[in-house]
């Protein structure tokens, strides 16, 4: 298949590493959803947004897995990543705004938990990783990045680290 030649370095291992950030984000989502349960509209809006984000990540993983298995370039799986990811974050943000306005989200309890030790350390590390991920992505042309396995390996390790730190920060914030 000539269409796969440009994705030569995309392997099953890369797809599996790409699944790690999705897994860590999903685990953090479960923790946050559990903490928000019972807050009505806020819970559902945040959950819908977060599910869209997870779906976008799963589509990207599946796209890389199909490339790694030499099945083919199912372009739609790669193309829906950005709109679903962006849309999911916007919907999640709307849920947070609704929760803030309706006072369903108790920031007076959440902020001290986020700022507690060691949660804050993990959140800072996660934020630094996300900034690094943004740098890696922005310093490359989109088409070049999407076809360069080496750049994808770097981005996925940075993203996996970031999402793991955010998951651990969430875990410690909610357990504190």
Image: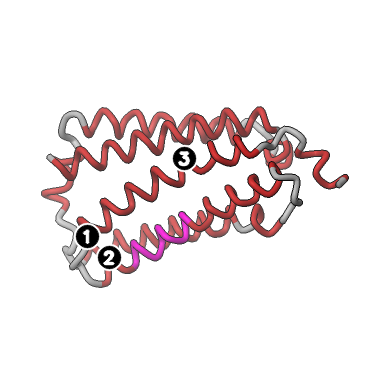
Q: Which residues are magenta?
A: 45-54
> Which residue is identified by label 2?
43
The mark that comes first in sequence, 2 or 3, is 3
Closer to us: mark 1 or mark 3? 3
> How many callouts does the rendering have?
3
* Residue farthest right in this picture: 2
- The alpha-carbon separation of the residues under discs 1 and 3 comes to 24 Å
Given contact means CB atoms under 8 Å apart, are the residues at marks 2 and 1 in contact?
Answer: yes
Residue at 63%, 39% (x, y): give it: 12
50 part of magenta stretch: yes
Label number found at residue 146 = none
Is disc 2 surrounded by few (<14), some (14 to 19) or many (20+) residues within 10 Å? Answer: many
Give the position of the C terminus as an image quadrant: top left
Element at label 3: helix
Q: Identify the residue shown where x is 66% and y is 55%.
A: 79
Cβ–Cβ below 8 Å for labels 2 and 3? no
Residue at figure coordinates x 32%, y 63% from the top left = 95
Q: Label 1: which residue?
A: 36
The outermost residue toward the bottom is 41
- Give residue 96's quadrant in the image: bottom left
Which residue is label 3 attached to?
A: 20
What is the distance, in whole Å, between disc 2 and disc 1 at their CAs? 6 Å
In the foreground, 71 or 90 = 71
Badge 2 element? helix
Element at label 1: helix
Q: Position of residue 75 (x, y in %)?
A: 72, 55
């Amino acid at each position: 298949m000539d269409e796969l030649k440009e994705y030569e370095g995309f392997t099953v291992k890369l797809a599996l590493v790409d699944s790690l950030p999705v897994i860590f984000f999903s685990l953090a989502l479960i923790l946050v959803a559990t903490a928000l349960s019972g807050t009505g509209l806020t819970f559902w809006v945040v959950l819908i947004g977060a599910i869209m984000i997870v779906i976008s990540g799963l589509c990207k993983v599946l796209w890389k897995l199909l490339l790694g298995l030499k099945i083919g370039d199912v372009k739609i799986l790669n193309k829906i990543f950005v709109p679903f990811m962006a849309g999911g974050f916007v919907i999640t943000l709307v849920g947070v705004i609704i929760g803030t306005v309706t006072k369903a989200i108790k920031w007076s309890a959440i902020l001290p938990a986020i700022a507690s030790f060691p949660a804050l350390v993990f959140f800072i590390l996660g934020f630094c990783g996300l900034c690094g991920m943004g740098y890696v992505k922005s310093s490359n042309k989109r088409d070049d990045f999407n076809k360069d396995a080496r750049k994808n390996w770097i981005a996925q390790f940075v993203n996996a680290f970031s999402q793991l730190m955010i998951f651990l920060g969430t875990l410690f914030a909610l357990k504190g």
